[in-house]
């Protein structure tokens, strides 16, 4: 880095003026210096420190000469200038134009060797805002032509908006094809701007440190972002995907929701550094579909399952197979049927920005029922044997294309796959060979959304590079090319729940995943369910449901049905660990069936199915091989049907 030089050389008025848009308050001025003699290469003059502004850097294929010194305009410095011949150039680096405006200008003295040249025919003025990677032209007025016009002029040109950066490069270049003696030749001297600084910013940096986790649940402590920079006396401004954040102007910032955050540190000299971006993902608080209240008689065995509620539709499976084997699955995990005409799938190929038009849009239609999926396939997709809900020739994507499930009524994304506006190359992927998910990729893979993911990505990550899809390895499982396992079905659920009796005397028999088996007590009960909903963000959720006693339950165990007709139906013992005696009376000779059912209505045992004479009958039922629970015994004849419940318990 060159030493700092804040001394600005002043113009000295000499001779007659031939001005074209001259502005006299230049903030930098390169007079090419006076030290040295004869002809000198740009590199040699740079090494010797003979340019006027030693804080800048100079390169090029032209050379420096004292012949034909600048004259004839206000501020012409004479002495050295740069001679630019066919295919040669002269370049200045390190101009700090960050504080400049589009109303500011650059001016320079220029000499042409022929009357026929107007300057702009072969001398190009260019700028680069990205360290010379690309160059853009700066337009300047044409010089006079005709007899006597081969002389020095002072020219002024407006600075383009793209040139207003802290590390600007300016270049003069001849486009003439020929030898060094070809005409026209040009000389340039006294390069100045009406803004900017010769203060060298170098290449300042800004770095963000994150305290806490950047993937978390709503209501948890948000992460703290702290920026450090080598910009001197910095001022700070934080940004998210929507632009500058009002009031966020300190070195420390705490986000309030999902988004991509970064800071710009700058100072009064126009030096500026932009930090890397940090993506913060906040999962919404979990909700559940209403669990129906359970009813039963004391000692009945009942079962309930808690159902996790998705925030909206989500993309549940992505198939990037060979050729046109492209599929996308959309899942309705909400508690309501959804009208798909309110949604469309949008694709942004190869880094297309979210603010622009999508590469294609696929409108959806029909009704997507609770717990069902909607599969879109390319017209020529063949690897899946199922029947897609929609074929579309526009469903074309590779590993570097972002997809957005868009909701029309809210004009917002309900789920985003990838990072819109960023091209990762061939794919987003995990390239760390030490990672357990090394090789996971969006290219030539099938990806299935993890069962614990109940909310789509609604804030675009907007991160560059192969790691720009931050939830690829946290929210998705990967399969090999053309593997369509589970395509056509999806669920969301939590890790195993913990069920507890919050009140009442129901008892928990067993639980599996999101379901619990209960024995009804003698009181109405409330059951709590607590589960870890998504290990990605360590979210938790809880819900509760009621278990109530049926109003038509018998008042005591083992009582017969009504004896008003004299036809009693009894069972003893009840509850039983095995044998039980069923007693009933028939008033006539008739055919009678006595069958035991479980609570689902499945027939489990036939005690009688034939002719019985008039009188009292006792039948033995062996329940020892049945699982513990509540069963129904039904006694039916042509004239009437009676039922009673029997409870089988463990020994």
Image (cartoon, helix red, strand yellow):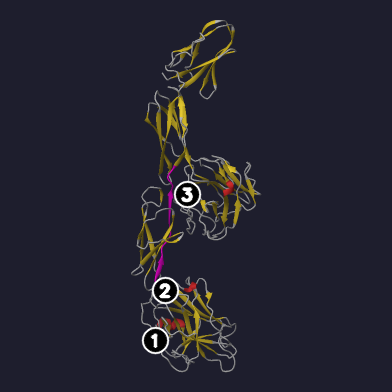
Q: Residues within 10 Å of mark 3 (few under 14, many from 20)?
A: some
Residue 116 at x, y percent in the picture: 60, 89
Marks 1 and 2: which is nearer the front? 2
Give the residue furthest to the left.
233
**Label drawn at residue 10:** 1
Return the x and y of residue 624 as percentages of the image width and height: 47, 17
Mark nearer the viewer, 1 or 3: 1
Mark number, residue 449: none
Q: From the image, which quarter does the C terminus lie in? A: top left
Quadrant into which the N terminus falls:
bottom left
Magenta-colored span? 270-286
Q: Which residue position holds label 2? A: 99
Judge by depth and name the residue closer to the eye, 581 or 378. 581
Comes first in the chain, label 1 or label 2: 1
The front one of 203 and 365 is: 365
Whether tag 2 and tag 3 are in contact, CB under 8 A, the answer is no
Circle 1 — which element?
A: loop
Q: Nearer the viewer, residue 79 or 13?
A: 13
* Secondary structure of the residue carrying numbered label 2: loop
Residue underneath mark 3: 473
Residue 256 location, quadrant: bottom left
Q: Is residue 283 magenta?
A: yes
The quarter of the displayed image where residue 205 is located: bottom left
């Amino acid at each position: 880095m060159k030493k700092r030089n804040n001394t600005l050389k002043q113009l000295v008025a000499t001779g007659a003026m031939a001005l074209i848009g001259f502005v006299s308050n230049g903030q930098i001025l390169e007079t090419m210096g006076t030290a040295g003699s004869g002809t000198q290469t740009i590199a040699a003059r740079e090494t010797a420190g003979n340019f006027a502004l030693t804080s800048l850097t100079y390169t090029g294929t032209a050379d420096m000469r004292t012949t034909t010194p600048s004259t004839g305009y206000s501020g012409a410095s004479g002495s050295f200038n740069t001679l630019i011949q066919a295919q040669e150039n002269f370049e200045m680096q390190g101009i700090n134009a960050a504080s400049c405006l589009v109303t500011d200008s650059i001016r320079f003295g220029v000499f042409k060797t022929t009357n026929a040249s107007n300057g702009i025919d072969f001398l190009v003025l260019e700028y680069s805002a990205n360290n010379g990677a690309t160059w853009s032209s700066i337009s300047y007025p044409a010089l006079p032509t005709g007899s006597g016009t081969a002389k020095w002029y002072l020219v002024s040109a407006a600075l383009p908006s793209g040139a207003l950066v802290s590390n600007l490069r300016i270049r003069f270049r001849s486009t003439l094809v020929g030898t060094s003696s070809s005409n026209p030749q040009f000389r340039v001297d006294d390069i100045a701007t009406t803004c900017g600084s010769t203060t060298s910013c170098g290449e300042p940096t800004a770095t963000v440190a994150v305290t806490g986790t950047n993937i978390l649940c709503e209501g948890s402590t948000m992460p703290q972002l702290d920026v450090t920079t080598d910009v001197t006396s910095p001022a700070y401004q934080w940004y998210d995907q929507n632009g500058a954040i009002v009031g966020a102007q300190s070195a420390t910032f705490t986000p309030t929701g999902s988004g991509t955050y970064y800071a710009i540190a700058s100072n009064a000299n126009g030096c500026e550094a932009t930090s890397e971006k940090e993506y913060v993902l906040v999962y919404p608080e979990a909700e559940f579909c209403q669990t129906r209240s359970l009813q039963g008689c004391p000692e009945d065995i009942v079962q309930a399952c808690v159902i996790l509620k998705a925030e909206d539709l989500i993309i549940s499976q992505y198939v990037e197979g060979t050729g046109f084997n492209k599929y996308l699955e959309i899942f309705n995990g909400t508690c309501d049927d959804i009208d798909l005409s309110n949604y469309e799938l949008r694709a942004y190929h190869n880094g297309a920005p979210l603010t622009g038009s999508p590469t294609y849009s696929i409108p959806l239609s029909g009704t997507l029922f609770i717990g069902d999926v909607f599969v879109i396939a390319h017209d020529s997709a063949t690897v899946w044997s199922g029947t897609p809900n929609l074929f579309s020739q526009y469903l074309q994507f590779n590993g570097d294309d972002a997809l957005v499930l868009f909701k029309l009524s809210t004009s917002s994304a309900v789920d985003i796959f990838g990072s819109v506006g960023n091209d990762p190359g061939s794919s987003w992927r995990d390239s760390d060979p030490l990672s357990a998910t090394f090789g996971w990729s969006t290219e030539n893979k099938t990806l299935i959304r993890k069962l614990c993911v109940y909310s789509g990505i609604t804030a675009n990550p907007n991160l560059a590079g192969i790691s720009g899809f931050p939830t690829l390895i946290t929210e998705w499982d990967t399969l090999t090319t053309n593997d369509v396992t589970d395509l056509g079905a999806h669920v969301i659920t939590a890790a195993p729940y913990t069920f507890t009796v919050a009140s009442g005397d129901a008892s928990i028999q067993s639980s599996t995943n999101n379901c619990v088996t209960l024995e009804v007590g003698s009181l109405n009960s409330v059951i709590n369910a607590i589960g870890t909903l998504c290990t990605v963000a360590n979210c938790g959720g809880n819900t509760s449901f009621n278990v109530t006693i049926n109003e038509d339950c018998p008042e005591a165990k083992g009582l017969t049905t009504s004896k008003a007709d004299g036809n009693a139906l009894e069972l003893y013992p009840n509850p039983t660990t095995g044998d039980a005696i069923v007693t009933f009376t028939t008033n006539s000779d008739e055919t009678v069936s006595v069958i035991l059912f479980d609570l689902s209505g499945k027939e489990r045992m036939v005690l009688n199915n034939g002719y019985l004479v008039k009188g009292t009958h006792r039948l033995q039922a062996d329940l020892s091989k049945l699982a513990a629970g509540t069963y129904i015994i039904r006694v039916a004849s042509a004239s009437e049907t009676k039922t009673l419940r029997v409870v089988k318990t463990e020994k």
